[in-house]
């Protein structure tokens, strides 16, 4: 039977397993469920037929869960295309190239026009539907994959950096040991008919023959560039784990990775330790009105006359991967902003600690006093450690009590103060400066 055409059709792929689509690898469905609730000749076309598989890959698809599912993304409808469709041991295997997502409420508003019956929404199946997807649905689409905020530009920059390091991305672990901590390779199908699963496939091409490079393995085979953020961040966290590299190598990786992650609203932060070595976790930066962690770990408040000392402290902290607000590093961010409003937000809302460099100049200047008032407001609101005074002299500063513990800078080099700040953050303190 020849196809009469595929214009204005779409795939509807539905599962009753509330986590079935929460993977970046091959998705699975019982091949016996293909064709249910389909139109015309699609009800009789065999999913085993390579031509059928190729035609299905040309149709847009809606990927969703049955009504009543209780999974974490039960109400998310994904829009995109099924790719690499195949049938193995009675299971349809396919990858999903997601182009965006919308809520189930929007879909339900158009259920009749889409030909999706009420009973059909309670049945795991793969249907080919007649008619296009209404433009109103496309307009309601969030045009990014669900759970993906980290752009391909950022991902490529990080992956390229890691695979070009003198040490491999997997460091002291072999590649399979590393990858199996992120993906369940034993349950993922192989793309090579000679092998049972992805683990054997990767071993063949990276250990036995070594005919795949790291770029192909990570970007093409494992799909790291288009994976959900949680998978990509798990990869990044492992790339800076104590099991993977020496202290200095990990510090270099953290610093470079944070440079890129910050652009998409994430950063690596030390969360715990293993054998006195830092373990980093990726966390999302704060957004306006959000409840995520602060944008900066440290903000520096100082007078311009004290800049030489402060800049050395800032440079040291940045070299250790600390997120620091230092004005000269924020010129593009500050350009064109209402500085009174923006700096109030920075010093009152956007940091874990404020290091206040107190001097006679600090007491006299307008902007340091503006920063001080914002920092004091934060300290009063939260009633916990926030302002960390560092004194060049004994100048009294309104709101800073003499009983508040401080560091006397005449006895500390910028590096020594930076080391104390690292300790306050609970971070690893290097014995020697980290070589570039």
Image (spheres, helix red, strand yellow):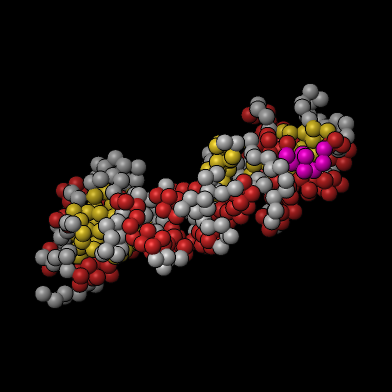
Q: Is residue 418 magenta?
A: yes
Magenta segment: 412-419
Q: Residue at x 18, y 53 (%)?
A: 30
Q: Residue furthest top?
A: 403
Left or right: residue 28 versus residue 248 is left
x, y percent for residue 22? 34, 49
Q: Horizontal and vertical percent for residue 63?
A: 29, 55
Q: Is residue 169 above or below residue 383?
A: below
Closer-to-camera residue (157/179): 179
Place of residue 29 in the rendered image (x, y in percent of width and height, measured from the top left): 22, 54
Which one is nearer the viewer's eye here, 275 or 407?
Answer: 275
From the viewer's side, name the closer residue of 152 and 384. 152
Q: Give the residue drawn at x 58%, y 60%.
A: 166
What is the chief secondary structure element of the magenta stretch? helix
- Residue at the farthest front position: 208
* Residue 14 in view (yes/no): yes
Which quadrant of the figure contains the N terminus? bottom left
Q: Is residue 283 magenta?
A: no
Identify the residue at image location x=68%, y=40%. Answer: 429
What's the residue at 30%, 51% (across, down)?
Answer: 187
Snapshot quadrant of residue 301: top right
Q: Would residue 428 appear left or right of 136 to someone viewing this image?
A: right
The quarter in which the C terminus is drawn is: bottom right
Q: How many marks?
A: 0
In the drawing, does residue 93 fall left or right of residue 268?
Answer: left
Q: Is residue 109 visible?
A: no
Return the x and y of residue 381 as percentages of the image width and height. 64, 29
């Amino acid at each position: 039977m020849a196809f009469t055409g595929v214009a204005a059709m779409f795939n509807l792929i539905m599962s009753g397993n509330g986590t079935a689509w929460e993977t970046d690898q091959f998705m699975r469905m019982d091949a016996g469920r293909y064709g249910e609730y389909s139109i015309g000749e699609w009800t009789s076309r065999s999913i085993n037929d390579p031509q059928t598989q190729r035609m299905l890959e040309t149709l847009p698809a809606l990927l969703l869960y049955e009504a009543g599912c209780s999974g974490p993304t039960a109400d998310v409808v994904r829009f995109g295309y099924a790719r690499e469709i195949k049938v193995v041991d009675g299971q349809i295997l396919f990858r999903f190239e997601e182009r965006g997502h919308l809520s189930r409420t929007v879909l339900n508003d158009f259920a009749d026009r889409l030909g999706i019956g009420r009973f059909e929404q309670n049945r795991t199946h793969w249907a080919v539907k007649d008619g296009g997807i209404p433009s109103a649905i496309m307009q309601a689409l969030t045009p990014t994959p669900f759970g993906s905020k980290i752009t391909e530009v950022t991902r490529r920059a990080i992956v390229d950096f890691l695979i070009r390091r003198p040490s491999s991305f997997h460091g002291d672990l072999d590649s399979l040991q590393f990858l199996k901590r992120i993906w369940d390779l034993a349950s993922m199908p192989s793309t090579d008919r000679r092998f049972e699963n992805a683990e054997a496939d990767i071993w063949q091409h990276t250990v036995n023959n070594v005919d795949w490079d790291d770029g192909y393995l990570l970007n093409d085979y494992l799909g790291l560039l288009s994976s959900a953020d949680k998978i990509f961040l798990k990869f990044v966290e492992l790339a800076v784990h104590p099991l993977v590299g020496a202290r200095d190598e990990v510090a270099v990786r953290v610093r470079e990775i944070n440079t890129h992650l910050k652009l998409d609203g994430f950063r690596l932060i030390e969360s715990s330790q293993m054998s006195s070595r830092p373990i980093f976790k990726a966390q999302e930066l704060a957004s306006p009105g959000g409840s995520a962690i602060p944008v900066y770990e440290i903000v520096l408040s100082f007078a311009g006359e004290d800049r030489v000392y402060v800049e050395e402290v800032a440079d040291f902290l940045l070299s250790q991967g600390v997120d620091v607000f230092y004005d000269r590093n924020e010129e593009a961010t500050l350009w064109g902003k209402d500085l009174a409003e923006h700096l109030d937000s920075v010093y009152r809302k956007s940091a874990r600690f404020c290091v206040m460099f107190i001097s006679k100049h600090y007491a006299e200047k307008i902007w340091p006093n503006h920063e001080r008032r914002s920092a004091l407001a934060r300290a009063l609101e939260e009633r916990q450690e926030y302002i960390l005074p560092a004194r060049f002299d004994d100048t009294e500063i309104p709101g800073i009590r003499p009983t508040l513990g401080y560091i006397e800078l005449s006895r500390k080099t910028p590096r020594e103060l930076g080391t104390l700040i690292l300790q306050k953050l609970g971070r690893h303190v290097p014995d020697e400066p980290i070589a570039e």
